[in-house]
Image (cartoon, rainbow, N blue to C red):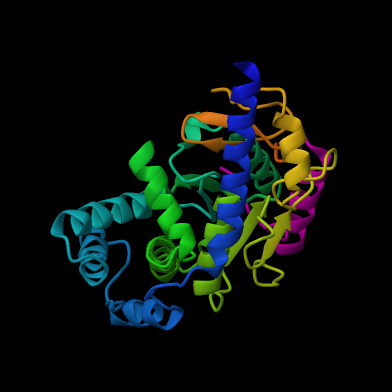
């Protein structure tokens, strides 16, 4: 029975890896472009004082109507965007949390990335920047969310990435001094890359990514983006698509509901071991790369006092 289970698991791993490898070759559908997003921003009113929250809410509703045909979705988007705007008052830098995996995990459920967000905020605090974290969940949890996430990946997130991109564009339009750092690992890195592609001409948007799958297009080369594919201890077998190393790591073990300390990939509720596919602030290769990126892009504020 154990031997049969191992064969089934190996077959599952092979199918998943091959399927993910074929995703970039699937045809892509119609998508919102960078020019479309810029047109939306230009259509919004900027004549009034942006401290007027009623005015901001009106502009958020106008943007929502452009993005969604469904009035319920439009209302949810406008309310969320208004709440984020309020949260960013007196903030210098917003960190956008974008989960890894297939997008259904929340920040509270993430065993890795919260430590990196804490580390980034500590570095920014030392440079006298006030920062806050907002969460962008791109998919639902469970089977329906998993299927939807696969569909989105097949088209390189044509409909979902522009939603986050318009949020960021809206914030930087009405908070002229605000800077935004999108973050993400694995497929969250892929998603963040698409957002950065859409906001390539916005100099106040940055990205910190890890474990970007090599079978997808690499992120656009830019000083405003850092991509980490090695935690400094073990090469990332998933980012490099080292299929045989992943098979070997799982040949004698069953998927579990807890992530492996060596690195793992989550499929629905189960984790498959993927050595090296783990990124925390405690990993020197992660911390050093991010610290260098922050120092390079965010010089210490002068004549300022951190709150």
| Residue 104 visible within the image | yes
Residue 295 percent coordinates (x, y): 76, 57
Answer above or below: position of 32 versus 269: below
Instruction: Please name whichever residue, 186 or 199, is drawn nearer the observer in this view of the structure.
Output: 186
Q: Is residue 60 magenta?
A: no
> On the image, which quarter does residue 157 sit in?
bottom left
Residue located farthest toward the left when viewing the structure as drawn: 71
Residue 163 percent coordinates (x, y): 37, 62
x 39%, y 48%: residue: 147
Quarter of the image with the N terminus in it: top right
Residue 58 percent coordinates (x, y): 20, 65
> On the image, which quarter does residue 82 sit in?
bottom left
Quarter of the image with the C terminus in it: top right
Instruction: Please name whichever residue, 128 or 173, is drawn nearer the observer in this view of the structure.
Output: 173
Q: Which residues are magenta?
A: 281-307
| Residue 189 visible within the image | no
Q: Is residue 200 left or right of residue 143?
A: right
Answer above or below: position of 203 versus 157: below
Q: Is residue 160 left or right of residue 226?
A: left
Answer above or below: position of 141 versus 166: above
x 50%, y 45%: residue: 133
Residue located farthest toward the right when viewing the structure as drawn: 233
Q: Is residue 302 magenta?
A: yes
Instruction: Please name whichever residue, 276 or 12, is drawn nearer the observer in this view of the structure.
Output: 12
- Number of numbered markers: 0
x 71%, y 63%: residue: 297
Q: Is residue 272 left or right of residue 247?
A: left
Instruction: Please name whichever residue, 210 or 14, is drawn nearer the observer in this view of the structure.
Output: 14
Residue 158 percent coordinates (x, y): 42, 68
Q: Is residue 197 left or right of residue 167?
A: right
């Amino acid at each position: 029975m154990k031997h049969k289970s191992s064969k089934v698991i190996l077959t599952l791993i092979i199918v998943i890896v091959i399927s993910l490898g074929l995703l970039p070759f699937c045809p892509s559908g119609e998508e919102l472009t960078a020019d479309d997003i810029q047109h939306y921003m230009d259509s919004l009113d900027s004549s009034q004082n942006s401290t007027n929250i009623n005015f901001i809410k009106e502009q958020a509703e106008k943007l929502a109507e452009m993005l969604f045909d469904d009035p319920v979705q439009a209302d949810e988007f406008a309310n969320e965007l208004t709440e984020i705007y309020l949260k960013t008052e007196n903030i210098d830098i917003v960190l956008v949390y974008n989960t890894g995996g297939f997008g259904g995990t929340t920040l509270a459920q993430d065993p890795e990335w919260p430590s990196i967000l804490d580390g980034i905020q500590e570095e920014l605090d030392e440079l006298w920047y006030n920062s806050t974290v907002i969460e962008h969940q791109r998919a639902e949890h469970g089977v329906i969310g998993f299927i939807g996430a696969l569909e989105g990946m097949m088209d390189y997130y044509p409909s979902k990435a522009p939603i986050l991109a318009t949020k960021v564009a809206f914030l930087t339009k009405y908070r002229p001094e605000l800077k935004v750092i999108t973050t993400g690992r694995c497929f969250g890195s892929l998603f963040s890359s698409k957002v950065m592609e859409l906001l390539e001409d916005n100099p106040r948007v940055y990205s910190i990514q890890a474990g970007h799958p090599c079978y997808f297009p690499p992120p656009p080369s830019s000083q405003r983006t850092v991509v980490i594919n090695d935690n400094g201890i073990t090469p990332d077998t998933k980012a490099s698509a080292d299929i045989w190393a992943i098979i070997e790591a799982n040949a004698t073990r069953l998927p579990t509901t807890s992530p492996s300390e060596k690195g793992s990939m989550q499929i629905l509720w189960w984790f498959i071991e993927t050595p090296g596919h783990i990124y925390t602030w405690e990993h020197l290769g992660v911390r050093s790369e991010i610290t260098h990126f922050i120092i390079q892009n965010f010089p210490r504020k002068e004549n300022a006092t951190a709150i």
